[in-house]
Image: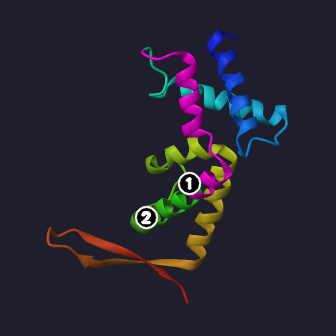
Amino acid sequence: MNYQHFLFSQLFMNHIETNETRYKDLSYDTIYGEVLMHLDEFSSSNFNVDTRSEYDCITDYLSHNILSKLAEEEEIKCMKSMMDSIYTYGKLESTDSYLVDYYVKLGSDVFNKTFNDHSKYLSENYSIDENVYQDYEGITYNSLILNK
């Protein structure tokens, strides 16, 4: 373990203990994988820069990516809205580039549950009406229609 790994894990645990996050009541065994995933994400992120202290870089990353429960609920709403758009205009896949940030912010468990539940909801309750509108540039639009 190097200093960055040590510092990241300490700051991660401090962050989740002082904020209402979904990680707060998880066991150490369960949270270990999440810490490693976030460490990897941090290492390749724009938060990890040489012009600021390691501490500041990590705390900024954590405050932007380890969400409070309220912020997580809002992020889930945004993810579902994005899924609605993807579904309306193409094939909905969990690996879609528009969904990558949600995977990082929500974590794999919340992301996968949200994706699977909302995908099922969309496919069972909606159909797509294509080319419902054309703008002055000739771009056509689709619409999501609730099945009766």
Amino acid on which the number 2 mark rests in the picture: Ser
Q: Which element type, helix, strand or loop, lies under badge 2?
A: helix
Q: Which residue occupies 62% across, 50% down?
A: 111
Residue 146, relative to residue 90: is it above or below? below
- The numbered dot on residue 110 is none
Q: Position of residue 70 (x, y in %)?
A: 64, 55
Left or right, 137 with respect to 21, comes to left
Residue 43 vs 33, above or below: the answer is above
Q: Which residue is mark 1?
A: 75
As displayed, is residue 111 above or below residue 14?
below
Q: Are marks 2 and 1 in contact (CB under 8 Å)?
A: no
As drawn, the residue found furthest toward the left would be: 136
Q: Which residue is mark 2?
A: 85
Q: Looking at the image, is mark 2 or mark 1 nearer the viewer?
A: 1
State the quadrant of the C terminus: bottom right
Start and end of the magenta stretch? 51-74
Q: Main secondary structure of the magenta part?
A: helix
Please name the amino acid that badge 1 sits on: Glu
User: Residue at (60%, 76%) from the top-left corner?
Assistant: 124
Membership of 40 in magenta stretch: no
Kindly state the secondary structure of the residue where label 1 is placed. Answer: helix
Which quadrant is home to the N terminus? top right
The answer to whether 30 is drawn above or below residue 119 in the figure is: above
Residue shown at the point (57%, 72%) measured from the top left:
123
Return the x and y of residue 108 as percentages of the image width and height.
Answer: 65, 44
In the rendered structure, the answer to whether residue 88 lies left or right of residue 6 reads: left
* Res. 41 visible in picture: no
